[in-house]
Image (cartoon, helix red, strand yellow):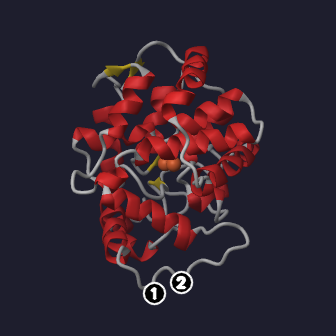
Amino acid sequence: MNDIDAVEDFIEKQVYPQPGQKAQSDYRNYDNPGRETVREFYRENHKHQTLAFVRAKRAEFLELNRQRMSPFAALDFLNTLIDDSDPDIELDQLQHLLQCAEAIRADGHEDWFVLTGLLHDLGKVLCLWGQPQWAVVGDTFPVGCRFSERIVYSEFFAENPDIHDPGLNSEPGIYRPGCGLRNILMSWGHDEYLFHVMKPYLPEPALYMIRYHSFYAWHREEQYDWLCDDHDRAMLPWVRKFNPYDLYSKSPTPPDWKQLRPYYEDLIAKYLPDELAF
Ligand SMILES: [Fe+2]
Ligand SMILES: [Fe+2]
């Protein structure tokens, strides 16, 4: 889990800092203890996220026949994602989800938006099934076409075999321009996976928030519009609206899960079935 924390901390503080705050200098030069971990994380990610890899992971996981769990069991399960050597981070995953949801609720948004805050990282349960962290978290991006230079550490795509295939290292690659994001394959991670788990249950903007919340090259860097259709463009403001809650909702007083649980039980019961297929 330390790697996941390092990667997410890096994204939050050094690549996409809060509006009005400066990034802590150029993330490539920034001298901090987590830097090598993060660099190595992105090196592995960019090297291995090929079109073939994504297709294989989709075949492996999107049958959703691995485990059936109640939404609460899944949240608890995610919470076992801890590093035994560090007792202080025991509740980090659940805390992040709760703080995100509570910040959305405090701003008076609709209940499905609050629920999306609570659920959006549940796909990280992939880590518990032996998946390497570079195939679970981090920025996501389309595969099967040229990688944008605006993706974090894009220089590491030099090690991705797809760039030597002219059919893949091009724009449009294997896609028809304007085909819509739903028709393209994204790098594999918790976002795409959870989208498929939640697809039957949540409203469309919630599904976009879940599916594309790590697609910074799109929602932050304004890349890949050539793949989008009007529906994607209509949903983009929702993805953008969600992002600050994901990145910047750490509250000084951590929310009390026990006390909040009845509210979230009702909310979950309103939208989700007793058991989810993972
Ligand atoms: Fe996430
Ligand atoms: Fe998150």
Q: Secondary structure at mark 1?
A: loop
Q: Whole-percent x and y of residue 88?
A: 35, 54
Q: Nearer the viewer, residue 171 or 263?
A: 263
The crowding category of the residue bearing disc 1, from other C-alpha atoms within 10 Å (few below 14, some 14 to 19, many at least 20), is: few
Q: Is residue 147 left or right of residue 101?
A: left
The crowding category of the residue bearing disc 2, from other C-alpha atoms within 10 Å (few below 14, some 14 to 19, many at least 20), is: few
Q: Report if the CB atoms under discs 2 and 1 are less than 8 Å apart.
A: yes
Q: Is residue 61 left or right of residue 108?
A: left
The quarter holding residue 74 reads: top left
Q: Whole-percent x and y of residue 239?
A: 66, 47
* 38 versus 68 height, above or below: below
Tag of residue 26:
2
Q: Which residue is mark 1?
A: 29
Determine if the C-beta at disc 1 is less than 8 A from ligand 1: no
Q: Nearer the viewer, residue 158 or 168?
A: 158
The residue at 33%/57% (across/down) is: 134
